[in-house]
Amino acid sequence: MGKTYRSGVRTNRYITPPGLQSGFLGFRTSVVRGNYFCGYKKGGLSTSGIGIFELPHKKIPMNKSTFFTGQPIFSQLLKLIPKDILAKIALAHKADRYCKRFNTYDHLVSLLYAIFNDCHSLREVVSGMLASEQRLLHLGVKYPPRRSTLSDANNRRSSGVFEAVYYSLFKRYAGLLPDSRHRRLYMVDSTIISLFQEVLRTGGMPPANGKRKGGIKVHAMLRSDQDIPCFIRFSEAAANDSPFLKEISLPSGSIVLFDRGYHDLSSFQRLTDKKITWITRLRKAFAIEVCQDNVVNASQRHIISDQLVWVGQKARYKILTRLITYRDEASDKIYEFLTNDFKRAPQTIAGLYRKRWQIETLFKRMKQNYPLRYFLGDTENAIKIQIWCAMIADFIVNLIKKTTAKRWAFSNLRVLIRIHLFTYINLKVFLNASEKALLKAFKPENSFNLQLFKT
């Protein structure tokens, strides 16, 4: 009958005609697209024929892109968001009322997909999810959204739903975030995200071309040891920062740092009454009346002066504070700090205020790693939803970073998750040794090279 040799793409069969020596391979038959071709050539004579279609009996391992085992990395990230909590939030906000298919969970998954993949338009989100339609079943999404469906959901479903999701995650996993830094130290600041339309009023002078753009201001409070905002509010970009101090609530004995944008003296006094230490910089509009000059220790050579002063605004309201004048050795600049802490050394006060830069790093990280330059909707609600989903994605990535044994730079971890979002591999094993895990998971078990002789 002859011998059959198989490869990964076709079956080669050699038939020895009667009367020929047994060492001759004979006719070669190949299976190509359902046809079975036979060819033989000896001394210029060629013969061809058509045989029966024959499939290879040996199992060929398929690539992970077509053969799914386990769960993709995206699915493992979504497991950090419990579905029962999400269902309770949706029920409390009536977010799924009149929804037939595209519920709150599908909406959240779609926006997190857009955040992790840096999608800048509805078309990118929808086409990307359609390209991964088979994998969406492992995420719990049965129906990929259409552009109109996603756009309507961004306008109709309240941003308060995603705000509640963020705070529920913070409450659930906050205990895994702290490190060795100061646990009572808080930073308060705000940042402006520019918009292409004046959906929310922005500040500053109008541009030369007369096309004024809008802006949304994100107010955040960050605890030093968590590196994740514990309190967030939104306002127009033109709004003042000071009202945000009236909304924060901190335990007694805390230390809060903020810049000169927060200048409400009544809020300063309220924090003092609650035994909360605050440190800020002196504003030029403040009226200063010196009460006492404290002695500066010679060892603190960067401290110019340490004074007790009455601080007021146009002589309407005054509070007793401490004014420390500090010279920075590196830049040779002079800084003036106001605080209600009368016990700590002046050098310690200046060192604490220097830690306020941590919240600036947070804003920089958010703007560099997440799509906050282009929004999937032009309404206030859609813009807030996308920012909340970016905060949720940032929380998840930070949680993974904190709980992984290997130390990762945030930007590297963020890019790695984006590239392997639908890779079917264990996330913990992958992050501890990414290249080894990939080589082990996708190592070919068989060679697909054509083998003519058995070895």
Image (cartoon, rainbow, N blue to C red):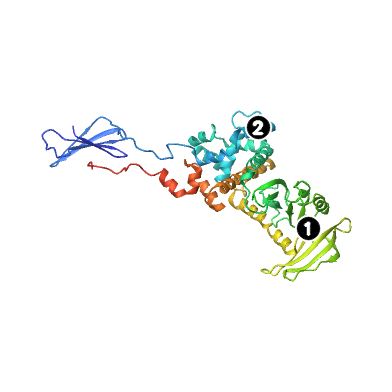
| SS for callout 2 | helix
**Left or right: where 266 falls relative to 116:** right
> In the depicted view, which residue is nearer to us: 450 or 205?
450
**Left or right: where 41 falls relative to 219:** left
Q: Which residue is drawn at 74% across and 57% down?
A: 259
Q: Which residue is drawn at 54% across and 47% down?
A: 404
Which residue type carries mark 1?
Asp
Q: Position of residue 199 (x, y in %)?
A: 70, 45
Q: State the quadrant of the N terminus.
A: top left
Q: Name the residue under label 1.
A: 341
Q: State the quadrant of the C terminus.
A: top left
Q: Name the residue under label 2.
A: 88
> In the depicted view, which residue is nearer to us: 101 or 230?
230
Q: Is residue 269 visible?
A: yes
Q: How crowded is mark 1: few (under 14 residues within 10 Å), some or many (20 or more)?
A: some
Q: Residue at x 66, y 34 (%)?
A: 89
Q: Where is residue 431 in the image (x, y as percent from the top left)?
A: 50, 47
Q: Position of residue 79 (x, y in %)?
A: 56, 38
Q: Which of marks 2 and 1 is nearer the N terminus?
A: 2
Count of numbered labels shown in the rendering = 2
Snapshot quadrant of residue 377: top right
**Left or right: where 218 falls relative to 141:** right
Which residue type carries mark 2?
Lys
Q: Position of residue 221 (x, y in %)?
A: 70, 49
Q: Residues within 10 Å of mark 2 (few under 14, many from 20)?
A: few
Q: Which residue is drawn at 60% across and 53% down?
A: 368
